[in-house]
Amino acid sequence: MIGSINIEWTTKWEDEIRKEDHESYASLLSRAFPDHSNVYSGTRSWYAARPEVRIVGTVDGKTIAHLGLLRRFLRGLESNSNTLVGDTGLVAIDPDYQNSGIGSLLLKQNSQLLANLNIPFGLLTCLPELVKFYKANGWQLLDGQKIAM
């Protein structure tokens, strides 16, 4: 709960998601990302890669928060080693609930999910103007990365 908002958090694996869930997620993503609203329609609730697992926050049955996670291996540039990461994306808060602290709660849910899946760290790409928010919630820029403005 945040303030008077009672959020129900659920973690859903992709094979557990029903048609109605996809429609609800697509509706939220369309509102949260209006520049890409044409991508999220009907039951299309992902952008490039389909998530493996999702964290969803609902209030009174309405989806107001969403995050998708996909396990990936990244190959080291200087060795043949591979590192497991939790590719985090589709991070969205309903515009009516933005700036309420729900985004921070969603990222805490993600941290717990990463720990439960024994994934050493999450990887997330975002717009430069969002870096401050993610840094405030414990995310860091990878070594050598710069913010382009």
Image (cartoon, rainbow, N blue to C red):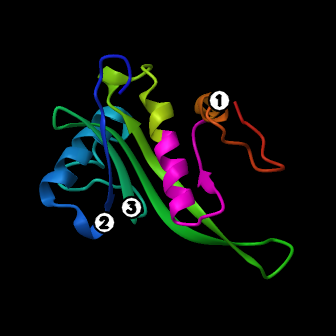
The foreground one among 124 and 2 is 2
Of all residues, the one furthest to the top in this rendering is 3
Sequence order check, earlier mark of 1 and 3: 3
Residue that sits furthest to the right in the current view:
78
Picture disc at residue 11: none
Q: Which element carries disc 2, helix, strand or loop? A: helix
Q: Is residue 51 above or below residue 136?
A: below
Answer few, some or many: residues within 10 Å of disc 2's Cα (few below 14, many 20 plus, some between 14 and 19): some
- Residue at disc 1, secondary structure: helix
Q: In whole angstroms, how far apart are the C-alphas of marks 1 and 3?
A: 24 Å
Q: Which mark is residue 136?
A: 1
Residue 42 visible, this angle: no
Alpha-carbon span between mark 2 and mark 1: 29 Å
Q: Answer yes or no: do the residues labelled 3 and 2 have beta carbons within 8 Å?
A: yes
| Residue with the mark numbered 3 | 53
Q: Decide: is 57 above or below 118.
A: above
Identify residue type, mark 1: Ala
Residue 129 position, x and y percent, is 60, 28
Residue that protrudes farthest toward the left in the picture: 20
Question: The residue tagged with tag 3: helix, strand or loop?
Answer: strand
Q: Amino acid at mark 3?
A: Val
> In the rendered structure, which segment of residues is drawn in magenta?
107-127
Q: Residue at 61% x, 35% y: name it.
A: 134
Q: Residue at x 84, y 49 (%)?
A: 144
The mark nearer the N terminus, 2 or 1, is: 2
What label sits on residue 14 in the rendered view? 2
> Are discs 2 and 1 less than 8 Å apart at CB?
no
Amino acid type of disc 2? Glu
